[in-house]
Amino acid sequence: MDRFNPEDIERRYEFEVDDVDRLFARLRPAEPPVGLSLQVLAAVSARARRRRRIGAWMALASLVMIALFSFLAGQQLATSGSLLVLQSLVSNLDLVMEAPADAALAAIQLVPWAYAALVVVGLAAVGLAARMLFHPTSKLMLSRPQERS
């Protein structure tokens, strides 16, 4: 059966065939422009290089951010005496067993949460940068596959 035979269209489709269907059955596929595949491959390659370069800079910046804020969090813990209190909580587990809520509250109050949050943001940025480095042609957002009807 020829694909473009307008007489076969009545046998292939269950619905009623009109003149528009017959005209569409006669259409031939359009020829792609000359060099289209080369243009597409060049665009994909340029996009992949650009995403790798952005991913490398993003990874470097986020690693510097992690190092900086980890250092600042350690400095704040050391200068405020919080590190000594946390160390005594860890070394004296009897105290923690006697009053776990108070020990947990003391530990929570001693942590510099602003710096800890910035370190977590830096870790997430490293993950995103790694994805950009190792999969430069994939999309960043997770998308649902489109359902075909």
Image: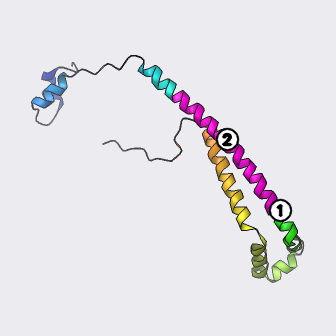
User: On the rendered image, what quadrant is the N terminus found in?
Assistant: top left
Measured as percent of width and height from the top left, residue 37 is found at: 44, 21
Residue range highlighted in magenta: 44-72
16 versus 66 height, above or below: above
Asked if residue 103 lies in the magenta stretch, the reply is: no
> Where does label 1 land, which residue?
74
The residue nearer to you, when weighing 2 against 111, is 111
In the image, taking residue 47 as reference, residue 63 lies left or right, namely: right
The residue nearer to you, when weighing 90 against 140, is 140
Q: Earlier in the sequence, mark 1 or mark 2?
A: 2
97 versus 144 height, above or below: below
Q: Quadrant of residue 147?
A: top left
Query: In the rendered structure, are the residues bearing label 1 and label 2 in contact, judged by CB atoms less than 8 Å apart?
Result: no
Instruction: Mark 1 vs mark 2: give the one in front.
Output: 2
SS under mark 1: helix
Q: Quadrant of residue 119?
A: bottom right
Q: What residue sits 71% from the left and 43% below the top?
A: 60
45 versus 1 height, above or below: below
> Where does label 2 land, which residue?
57
The residue nearer to you, when weighing 13 against 47, is 47
Q: What residue sits 82% from the left and 83% below the top?
A: 98
User: On the rendered image, what quadrant is the C terminus found in?
Assistant: top left
> Which amino acid, mark 2?
Trp
